[in-house]
Every structure is written in C-alpha cells, then in structure tokens.
Amino acid sequence: MLTAIVGINWGDEGKGRFVDLLSADYDIVCRYQGGNNAGHTVINSRGKFILNLLPSGILRPDVVNVMGNGMVIDAEHLWGEMGRLRAAGVEIGPQNLKISDRAILCMPCHKQQDILEEERLADRAYGSTRSGIAPVYGDKYMKKALRMGDLLNPGYCRKRLESLMEFKSLVAQGVYHREALSVEEMWGWVEQFALPLTEYICDTGRYLEEQIEEGKDVMFEAQLGALRDIDFGIYPYTSSSNTIAAYAPIGTGIPGRRLDCTVGIMKAYSTCVGEGPFTCELFGDKAEELREAGGEYGAKTGRPRRVGPFDVPASRYGVRMQGADMLALTKMDVLSYLKEIPVCAGYSIDGKVTGEFPVGDALNRAKPVWETLPGWHCDLSGCKSPADLPKAALDYILYLEKQVGCPIRYVSFGPEREQYLEMK
Ligand code: GDP
C-alpha cells in the first residue's frame, strides 16, 4: 500500500499528527520534497516534537524513514534535530533513517542568499522562512548544487564545491555587493556536518522498490499544502518544490509507481504564513480571537499566522490538485467558541461570483462571498464517534464534505494522538 498524507490548504493543517497516527500501520515513512522550512508538530506519550527535516515516522521505533531525492537537506540543521530527538530517547541510525544520494545539500551560502534577497525585496518580500530553500532549489535547476551522493567521494565533492563557490561568489558580489565566499570556510562546514552523514546515504529509490516488492507499506509525508505547490500554488507565494501527492513517487525515486491512496489533511478554518493573496482573511479582534483559539503561531518561526474562516474555492481546488481520496478535517475544537461560523463560500471577482479558484492577478481582486452556519458552541473532547457530535458540528462536517467534493474520513478535535474520531 502506497499512501500519501498531504495538505489541502496553505500548510500547517496538522499533517504531522496524522502521519504520526496513521504510520502505526506502515513500515516506511518518506519525505519527498522541501527542507527544514517545514515544521511538523507531533504530540504523543513521549512528549512534544517539532520536526523540520526528519519524517514523522522517526518517533515510531519500528518504522524506517526515508528522506527522498526531492528534498533539500541542511546537514547542520539535521544534526541539531537528531540531537534533540536523541536527547528525548529516540533512536536514530542508518537502520531507521535513509537519505537519498540524489537529495540536494542545502548549505550556509543558500541561507545567506535567502536572507539577502528577502532584505533586498524589503516590503515586497515573499515571507520566506530564510532557510535557503528557494536559492538551493534554484541552484538544483541551474545544476549548481551538491547532491548527498557527492559526499561519498570527498575528492570529487571538493572539486564540485570549488566550482560552485565560484558562481555563488559572483552572485554574492555582483547582486548583493558582499564579499566573495570562502571555499575553505564552506568546505570546513561540509567536513563538519555533511561528510559525517555518509553512513545514512543510499539509493533510496532502489531501497523502496525492494521493500515494495516484499509487500511493505509505504507512507509519503508532504510538507506545506496544495496552495504552496510551485506549479499549482499561488505563484510566486509558493514554496520552491512540488507539494502535491503526484510528486511523492518522483521525489522518493520510484517514479513508475502509483499511489494507492491520498489522504488530504484539511483545516476546519484557514491559516496562511507569509505574504500573498488570502481572500478569506480576518482582521482585528475577530482575527485575534481565532488566532488565540487555534494557537496559530508558526511551529518553526513563531510568526503569527494570518487567519480566516474556511475557504471553499481554495479548499476544493486543493482537493482536486491533491487528487485526495479522503480527508482528515483538523482543529474542529478551535471553532467551538463561535456561536455562528462564517465560511467563505465563493469569490466575487470584478462583480462576478465564482466557486473556481483563479490563477494570477484575478486572485488579488477576489472578494469573499460569506455564508454563515450555526456553531455548536460546546466542548467536543468527549466525542468518540459521529453519533456523539452535536448536530451543528455534524452539519458543518457534511457541508464541507459536499462543498469540496471528497469524503471526510477523520475529524480531529485536539492535538494529541487519540483526539480524533472516524466518520464511518
Ligand atoms: P503540519 O505542518 O501540517 O504538520 O501542521 P503544524 O504542526 O504546523 O500545525 C498544526 C498544529 O496544530 C500543531 O501545533 C498541532 O499540534 C496542532 N493540531 C493538530 N491537530 C489539531 C486539532 O485537531 N486540534 C487542535 N487544537 N490542534 C491541533
């Protein structure tokens, strides 16, 4: 069984907790794109963990975790993350962590370029997490990056680095008026943080093929949501990678394989980190109330997230782009404080109402068309099955299901592993 767990919205939907929950039935969990700009929060009996690079399956001792070729990996950050988890008693070794030899190494020069570019853009900045993700993906496509497999031959790696630093120095000097980069400094970083990773590096595509042939079940864990996909998201306010489920087999080295199931994680309301059009956005006291109720501050950056009611056109589009077979609706409990629940049911663009999610500048002109649904206004934590749900909560779930055109299989009403119910 090949299953992808992906975000329907702008990210931060609560994917990490569902990967943690559902990975109990899987042998392998893979990340297939992105880098340490992700911030997946998992809370279980061992404590609270924020994972940026490591797949969420790392918290289950019998699960093998794969960091796929579609990823960009900051080696220094990875050691920090492994150190924090080990300190909490999580075992990590080549037996349960495999890094693709085709994944790209994210280096300090990428981080520096990210920061310089956001500073250059000033009030036009993209709202990057400043982890170097856009520059390193840019270099990947310019064919000016190091791959993890290069580390297996230090002599070759050093030569490649020298030639890459020549280019990076020209960019630093010419575009940002900074000093040339030091090859020795960058090689020192590679020796300290990247070369010690070699025991984890392998051909993960071949490994996955073998495991799938043996009948092993594989889960693919996405970072961010459909609306941040580089091709199908709100460009240029996207991430620099493909966040959609269809990329999962490509980003892990098994491009000929098809997914058996895609589970879309969809939030009961909307949040967005960073810049770009966000049609359903709330402002002032209403926004503050929702932000507080949902604890909507970035897991990685601590930045307050932009918040708004559920957005039907955006979520329906997200479901379609992900090809979701079923959905998990998260954070229902957060809306319990509301007597009435507003929903952005459509967009008005230049006076025309539409349910379609537009591309390009039309999205900047979209105005929300509101509908109001009754709230349940009570604590949902005792609900163990759909029959326990107050009518208004059940109606809200059925309304969303109908609007986005995909069955909602799970509903969560708290961050902990068991705080969910199955709609059957
Ligand atoms: P991810 O990037 O999609 O994994 O999402 P994040 O981890 O950034 O954000 C999800 C946040 O919501 C985390 O703090 C989770 O612990 C929390 N969370 C997940 N599901 C629920 C839920 O059903 N209710 C509440 N209150 N919090 C949740």
Image (cartoon, helix red, strand yellow):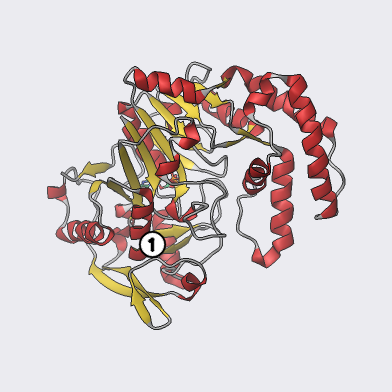
Tell me if residue 135 comes above or below residue 346 in the rendering: above
Residue at image mark 1: 314
Taking 383 as reference, is 86 left or right?
Answer: right
Q: Mark 1 belongs to which amino acid?
A: Ala
Q: Please identify the quadrant where the C terminus is shown.
A: top left
Taking 393 as reference, is 319 left or right?
Answer: right
On the image, the x and y values in percent for residue 405 come to 25, 57
Residue 194 in view, yes or no: yes
Q: Please identify the quadrant where the N terminus is shown.
A: top left
Nearest the eye: 217 or 289: 217
On the image, the x and y values in percent for residue 351 come to 39, 83
> Which quadrant would residue 268 be assigned to in this image?
bottom left
On the image, the x and y values in percent for residue 174 come to 84, 53
- The secondary structure type at the circle numbered 1 is helix
Q: Residue furthest bottom?
A: 351
Taking 391 as reference, is 260 left or right?
Answer: right
Seen at 60% across and 31% down, the residue is 78
Nearest the eye: 323 or 4: 323
On the image, the x and y values in percent for residue 180 come to 86, 44
| Callout count | 1
Tell me if residue 90 comes above or below residue 283 in the rendering: above
